[in-house]
Amino acid sequence: MYFELKNIGAIKEAKIELGKLTVICGKNNTGKTYLTYSLFGFLSTLFEHADDFNSLDTFVEFYLERLNEIFSANADEFAGAEFNLVMIGSNQSEFQLNEDLINQFPRPFILPAERTGILLFQKELDKNKTALIKALTKTRHLALLEDNLARFALPIEKDIDFARNCENVIKSNSFLKQEKPELTTYIEEMLGVQYEIIDGQKIVRDKFTHRAMPYYMSSSSVRALFDLHLWLKHQAKKGDILFIDEPELNLHPENQIKMTRLFVKLINSGINLFITTHSSSIIKEFNNLVMLANDFPEKEAMMNGFGYTKDDILHEKDLKAYIAHRDGTVSSVDIDEYGMIQSGFDEFIVQFNETSNKLISAIDNLLDLSNEVTKSY
């Protein structure tokens, strides 16, 4: 099964097949977020409205018609948009939208790039919304209510809902809590904190000083990963798909690599993952984990030396990667035993290294000349 998208925002044409791990690379303003929102929106809408439709075809048509609502944008912006789901090797019209078919799709959860701001301002947004509703209701200006309430793209709305519902979220446990408890505390160990919900308030406790503080006073990296920690600990189910727009936000390169290992541990535990990234560190570590799937004499010693386990191994077949281009197209990336053959960063890395080498050479030549002059005296 794969998705076909045309004329959706910056995306002119794309064909995306989801893997256990799907990675989207590309420069700024090439449509990576449009891809993320479109696919998340489809899956989210499917699980909410599947009972209203008999066939997959009619649901896809319905989703395309409300695509502007997913992005909270004017319908004219999507006048030429196309969105289709292709079931490989089958007649599309034959698919009845029943429980068996729906179970073939992963249930989505998303962390948009706006997640740190959502954590900071969610309560303020709710207060303003409540005050506006009361004011318009009191003055009987109900017709203005819908026009004045703030609208956000569906992924942002979903993240706001998750943030405001944290008190209920923690009442249940994910399958990881029982089967892989170390993954539910991974982020806390990485950041040196402990996340807590006390009387409905999000609290961050420093593991070294034991000082507790409101989450809004913690670092941006700690805030950015709070909801991911809650989801992994309390809501994640096998077969779910986790969408993360730019997981490297606010993270030191060392922690970017640790997050990459967490992602692979998650897909090896039964969670699917879809990320967009600008981080060459994340891509390089994914490639390292693909190489670990090969058999070679020094493998065990190298894994022990670098702290890898069998859960860190990324199999070539589980990875799908794509590059979004300036012209609006999206190309698939070939994967071999060394990982992603292209990454979208290659040209920049080569240019960066050439610049550094030339500067080093020029400085060395100057120092050599200076030493020669000194010796002559």
Image (spheres, rainbow, N blue to C red):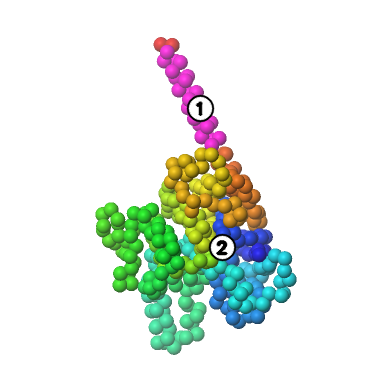
Where does the image place residue 4, in percent across and percent down from the top left?
A: 67, 64
Q: Which residue is mark 1?
A: 362
Q: Nearer the viewer, residue 3 or 104?
A: 104
**Which is nearer the eye, 211 or 136?**
211
Please identify the quarter of the rendering in which residue 305 is found.
top left
Q: Does residue 279 appear anywhere in the picture?
A: no
Q: Specify the principal SS of the magenta part.
A: helix
- Residue 366 within the magenta-colored segment of the rendering: yes
Q: Position of residue 275 (x, y in %)?
A: 53, 58
Badge 2 density bin: few <14, some 14–19, many ≥20, Cα 10 Å: many
Count of picture labels:
2
Residue 205 seen in the current view: yes
Pointer 2 residue: 36
Q: Which mark is residue 311?
A: none
- In the image: residue 61, left or right of residue 69: right
Q: Amino acid at mark 1?
A: Ala
The reply, left or right, for residue 210 in relation to residue 72 is: left
x and y percentages locating residue 102 in the rendered image = 60, 73
Residue for point 50% across, 85% down: 143
Between 304 and 146, the one nearer to me in the picture = 304
| Residue 52 in magenta stretch | no
Which of discs 2 and 1 lies nearer the camera? The answer is: 2
- The magenta segment: 353-375
* Distance of label 2 from label 1 (alpha carbons): 45 Å
Q: Is residue 92 left or right of residue 227?
A: right
Q: Earlier in the sequence, mark 2 or mark 1?
A: 2
